Amino acid sequence: MSSQTNFEQFVKELTDFRQISETEILHMAVQVAAKMYRFLTKDLDALDIVIDKNGKVELYKSDKQVKISKKVKQLIVWAVFRSMENKIFLNYRIN
């Protein structure tokens, strides 16, 4: 699920299946991305994170875009997918 179209499809499926808004899903994704970035880089400064519907991740610090390696970006996207899948699965089992 690393391609951008897969992320967009994943968001669509979640909104259709669980009636969770796109905004809520992207908010969850941003939270996970921030945690993963801080874990991988040990950088605890405040970040602004943008994740669009296509799965593109951008990080900003003090209005300047943070350059991160492709590997770190892939790990962030992977963490976002896994976390969201787990949250939705647990929510489904509870309801």
Image: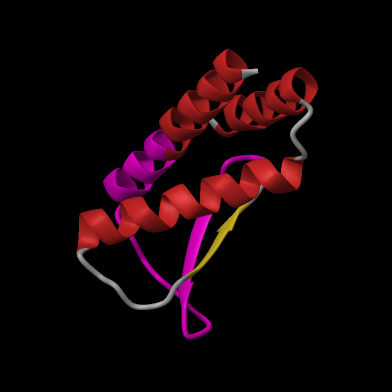
In the image, residue 43 sits, relative to residue 72, either above or below, namely below
Q: Is residue 36 left or right of residue 3?
A: left
- Residue 42, percent across and down? 20, 65
**Residue 69 is a magenta residue:** yes
In the image, residue 80 sits, relative to residue 1, either above or below, namely below
**Residue 20 is a magenta residue:** no
Residue at figure coordinates x 58%, y 24% from the top left = 91
Residue at figure coordinates x 50%, y 25% from the top left = 85
In the image, residue 11 sits, relative to residue 26, either above or below, namely above
| Number of numbered discs visible in the structure rendering | 0
- Residue 16, percent across and down? 79, 21
Outermost residue, bottom direction?
62
Outermost residue, front direction?
94
Q: In this view, does 28 lie to the left or right of 80?
A: right
Observer able to see residue 30 = yes
- Residue 71, percent across and down? 28, 44
Observer able to see residue 56 = no
Q: What stretch is highlighted in magenta?
A: 54-79
